[in-house]
Image (spheres, coloured by chain):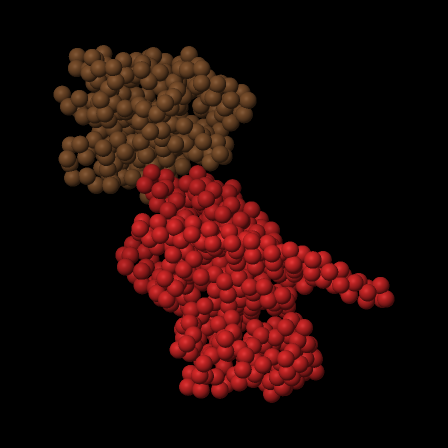
Amino acid sequence: MEVWDGISDARIHFSASDIGLDENTQGMSRITENINLQRGLLRYLSTMPDLHLIDKTKMTSIVREHEDAGGWPLVHLDNSKILRARLLIGADGFNSPVRKYAQIPSYGWSYDTQAIVATMFHSPRGPLQRPNTTAYQRFLPTGPIAFLPISPTASSLVWSIRPHIATAIMASSLSVLARMINAAYRLPHDSLQYLYNRILEHQNAGTPISVDEVIEEVEFRERAHGIDTTSAYSSSHTMENTVENQGVPPADSEMLPPLVTSIQPGTVASFPLRFNHTETYIGEGRGSRTVLVGDAAHTVHPLAGQGLNLGLADAECLARVINNAVLSGSDIGTHASLLPYTQERYFQNHKMMSVFDKLHKLYTTSFGPIVQARSMGLEVLNEFDTVKAAIMLNAGSQPRQNEASLRSTVFNLAGSALETASGVKKAADLTRGAVGSMVMNGIQQWMKTSRPGQSS
Amino acid sequence: MLPSRLLRSTVNAAEISFFSRLSSQWWDERGEFAFLHQMNPVRMQFIRQKLLETACDEDETVSQNILKGLQVLDVGCGGGLLSESLARLGARTVGIDASEPNIEIAKHHASTDSRLSENLSYMHTSAESLLSQSRRYDVVCSMEVLEHVDNPALFLSTCAQLLKPSGHLFLSTISRTPLAYFLTIMMAENVLRRVAPGTHTYSKFIKPSELVEFFQSYGSCPWIAPSAAQPTRTEAEVRGIVYNPLSSSWNLAPRDAWAATECNYMFWVRKPAE
């Protein structure tokens, strides 16, 4: 996985081999299309005879049974059936009706950001390159753009961007989106900002921008920035970039994702980004016998791609807690039975959510000194393989379980820690140079930004 | 007013009226009996473990549903916290309590859970009054009751007589130690007010060694061999249960853990096969 700063180009490289996994066969994490995940789960559920799946049915309301009858939640369905729930699990997303029924308060804020998702097609990686198994993420001041490989010629996009720009891009044609994705990975931020403005102008005039105009603008700005047409940073030869005529790829080709040639129609969607965490996961009092998992309990910024992982971890933990409760003959709907679930997950989720939130805030600024500091931090971090391994393990990567390879992982990490010692020296040298220029840049930046402020 | 048949028994009238006043709170998980709600899984864990262990020793075909079909008596069932759990695991459970409001609460609460009706019944009676009936039980449980009865020796022998041969007696109570006084009376009742003041009386607490001695000298055929200092694993077992305030949960201490039985503990003894 390649992650870099949209302003300074400071880069960090996460590799599966850092945690003792084989890059080609195992990888550090996996991208799975939702439909496959759902199909797999349905197949598994069909092996359980005691489980009733009610489909093609909507819930109309949840009401609380009379106190004397037990006060259990009654779920009314649109086929006029009523389900009396010993335990009602709210896995019903951000606008959770179960959370509303349970009156569980939540707090949070919305980021001034919209996420665009889509499935992108591109030419396969050439024989001299790594296969399409690397994720690319560039942190732009408008939000991160992520490229997540699915197959040799298809990848998934998550592009977080300001809502008005998202609306304008979504209103343009799919080929404009494809061109803009390529540009967002390659052009400096100033030029991107210019392109966004052009798109917005067209949007305001009521005529969406044409793809030819985007191509022309991008090519002009590439020339202006002195980007060589043979470099991977050039998008001028986009459509001819096939395996046959590719030849030897440019030296920097693996720094960037492959050029997007088209977008799969019908896959483009966008949704607002929020930070949200409920105060508790278990309903009490009038909302008793309810528990929340996944997005119903917490919504995060997708910049680390961890929303699903947090939800899966919730589900795993809740299943384990319910199993223990059943073994001891407990009523699984009670607070005492469910308490271990909150105890295990709440802090864990909160910790991860805070990290994503701080990362978002750190990377949406283009204030010089902060850019310098975060870039230096990233470059230094890139030298510490042990720390990187720890980050990857926290993000859900699993090193192989057998003991021998675990030991080799530990030795590798110890070895790389030694290597890091020299890296630290390198980083220290780099820092010494950087601190000087940082102070200078900071002052210059401050002068630049403060001058218009004084005149107005 | 207590029925006259209860008066000549181990039932302490003052204790019964005390718990009757609190009866409405039995099922409030955050209220008066929060500690008991939290303790319940550990009690069930100990009961299941011990039943499974003895079943394995006797090389029966052991199933995980070890409680299924057993005749179980819960003496002093209160609001039915343990009785419901036993019934849910398939035991044919009878809960008895000397407090009528308790039984009313227990019956009402069980009626809200349709799965309980076939295995669970409650009676307002004392253990002594059951002796006149012919029914005997595979398992007799009496949780946090021993420290509230008059004449514990009579109470224990009543429980013992209610068991079938090879039946299991499970008790949980509090040891008579300075630590127990500090934790259960001073802290829980008087300082933190987590339990109503007056719930416990120090002099009524019973040490594990006293329980072991009782069964070493019980009847013509002692349940625990009198010579040995420690009962063997197949005769009886004392396990401490320790509260962890950080996770607000109880844990079953390992066998022979140091000082674990100084406060709350569980006791198991098995009736000889005759």
In the figure, is residue B45 to the left or right of B216?
right
Residue with the most extreme right position:
A455
* Quadrant that contains the C terminus of chain A: bottom right
Report the side of B71 relative to A161 (left or right): left
Q: In the depicted view, which residue is nearer to us: A100 or A59? A: A100
User: What residue lies at 23% left-to-right and 33% top-to-bottom?
Assistant: B53
Q: Is residue A13 visible?
A: yes
Q: At 36% from the left edge and 33% from the top edge, which residue is drawn?
A: B42
Determine whether A163 is above or below B159 in the image.
Answer: below
The residue depicted at 19 percent of the width and 39 percent of the height is B62
Relative to A288, A209 lies left or right: right
Residue A203 or residue A50, whichever sits in front: A203
Please provide percent x and percent y for residue A64.
49, 48
Residue at 27% across, 33% down: B49
Q: Colour of chain B?
A: brown
Whether residue A114 is visible, yes or no, is: no
Residue B131: image location, x then y, percent: 24, 20
Instruction: Please name whichever residue, A95 or A238, is drawn nearer the observer in this view of the structure.
Output: A238
In the image, residue A344 sits, relative to residue A237, either above or below, namely above
State how many labels appear.
Answer: 0
Foreground residue, A243 or A90? A243
The correct choice, above or below, for A310 with respect to A208 in the image is: above
Chain letter, colour red: A
Measured from the top left, where is residue A141 in percent x and y? Answer: 64, 65
Q: Is residue A409 above or below residue B164?
A: below
Question: Would residue A55 appear left or right of B160 to someone viewing this image?
Answer: right
